Image (cartoon, rainbow, N blue to C red):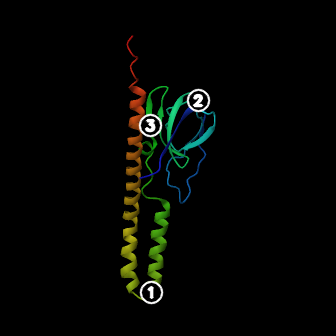
Amino acid sequence: MYVLETLTGRLIEARRYLNRIPGLRDDDPSRERWELWLADASNREHKIVVYSRCMPARAGHAVTVIHYGGRGVGLYNLSIGMRVNFVLENPIALLRSIDVVVIVFGSFGALMLGAYWHPMVLLIGLPLLALYGPVAMLSRRHYQVSLANQVEEMLDPIQVEDVVKPFKPRR
């Protein structure tokens, strides 16, 4: 389980940035990011970064943001009643460019070690490198699914609390 936190407040500013170039170790395929500035009940400002194309909130809306270390993973807009799970909206890339680099240089290293040291390195190293890609992709998929499920479990009660308003007492 991940330590997800919620932050409820008024959205002061939402800035969209498009100039993000993905790096070699980048886990997010979207080139867009939003910087959200929220003011909570005590008027303290908080910055949340969301890597997504969709943003169902504008300045002045009351929102509840679910974040994981300052990175927004879910949002419920209390003003318009719309919710979004950013983990499902922009899934992470299962195969990254760093994986291809590891497999290519690892197999080259295994070939060199097998040629100069012992041929048994080829029998051990190449199957391990062949398993690296699927294991890395499965672990990333597991991370994505478990985080998305946990965000959905946190968004459900927030939506129910907003939709089901308490009845006024009879007089």
In the rendered image, the vertical position of residue 122 relative to residue 36, given as above or below = below
Q: Which mark is residue 59?
A: 2
Quick check: 122 left or right of 112?
left
Does residue 17 appear anywhere in the picture? no
Q: Position of residue 154 (x, y in %)?
A: 41, 41
Which image quadrant: the C terminus?
A: top left
Mark positioned earlier in the residue sequence (2 or 1): 2
Earlier sequence position, callout 1 versus callout 3? 3
Bin the neighbour count of mark 3 within 10 Å (Cα to Cα): few under 14, some 14-19, many 20 and up: some
Residue 112 visible, this orientation: yes
Classify residue 135 by image quadrant: bottom left
Residue flagged by tag 2: what amino acid is it?
Ala
Position in image of residue 68 (x %, y %): 50, 48
Q: Name the residue that disc number 1 marks.
A: 115
Question: Which residue shows up at 44% across the image and 86% down it?
Answer: 115
- Name the one closer to the observer, 162 or 53: 162
* Type of amino acid at the residue the image marks with label 3: Val
Residue at 56% in and 44% down: 49
Q: Position of residue 160 (x, y in %)?
A: 38, 31
Q: Secondary structure at mark 3?
A: strand
